[in-house]
Image (tube, helix red, strand yellow):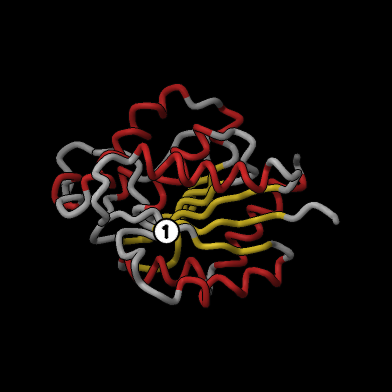
Amino acid sequence: MSPEHHVIYVPGLNDGRKGYELLINRWSMYGVVPHVHRVGWHDEEKSFKPKLKKLVAEINKYLDRGDSVSLVGGSAGGSAVLNALMEQPKITAVVNLCGRLRKGKNVFPSLDIAAQRSPSFKDSVLTFEGSEPGMTSDLRKKVLNLIPLWDEVVPKVTVSLRGATNKTLPSVEHMLSGFLGLTVFSPMVMGFIKEKAMQK
């Protein structure tokens, strides 16, 4: 059996919703195997570490059998997939879709406001912000950041990442931009992932 390329989508704070599988199943037309990994941002576990451990375990399940893995994180899932990359550098590519990567200074909404109902989300953002200075240039090159023209939920200054590919989406509003990133702009997402796969 030839190796497969698995693309795992990690949703944001509303990851309890149904329907994500239907949105990303069409990614299979690009020759990848799409999956949804729900972190459980609102469950009883307040720390992000156990959630990250489960995500990395799923990634390693595919890597251990000789397959490739890329990640797409939407909103709160953005920091989650970046944290996973720091834990498992064999990941092929990571796409952050409208996701906050740092606390930010004098921004609105503040991280405390954005994460008031999910301590694990705050922990995820602060975990990546703390490890980001040690991120190698090779890992940064694996990252595509997609940032809307205007986002009322995630301040722009908390998203961009030095050394990564930072692109502005021709869209506004957080939820709409996230939806468009999974659908209308999916060729951009998949194009980046396929490009990185060819460079391996």
Nearer to the camera, 135 or 53: 53
Return the residue at label 1.
38
Q: Element under label 1?
A: loop
- Where's residue 178, x and y in %? 40, 66
- Where's residue 134, x and y in %? 45, 22
In-image side of 27 versus 94 (left or right): right
Which quadrant would the N terminus be assigned to in this image?
bottom right
Residue drawn 16% across and 46% down? 110
In-image side of 28 versus 13 (left or right): right
Q: Residue furthest front?
A: 44
Question: Image height check: is 142 above or below 182?
Answer: above
Sort mark 1 into few (<14), some (14-19) or many (20+) by Cα contacts within 10 Å: many
Nearer to the camera, 199 or 11: 11
Asked where in the image residue 17 lies, by quadrant, the reply is bottom left
Which quadrant would the C terminus be assigned to in this image?
top right
Q: Which three-letter amino acid code belongs to the residue tagged 1?
A: Arg
In-image side of 103 versus 170 (left or right): left
Q: Residue furthest top?
A: 134
- Where's residue 122, x and y in %? 25, 43
Question: Image height check: is 23 above or below 55?
Answer: below
Residue drawn 58% across and 59% down? 189
Residue drawn 69% across and 62% down? 32
Residue drawn 74% across and 64% down? 31
Question: Image height check: is 120 above or below 152?
Answer: above
Q: Residue furthest right?
A: 1
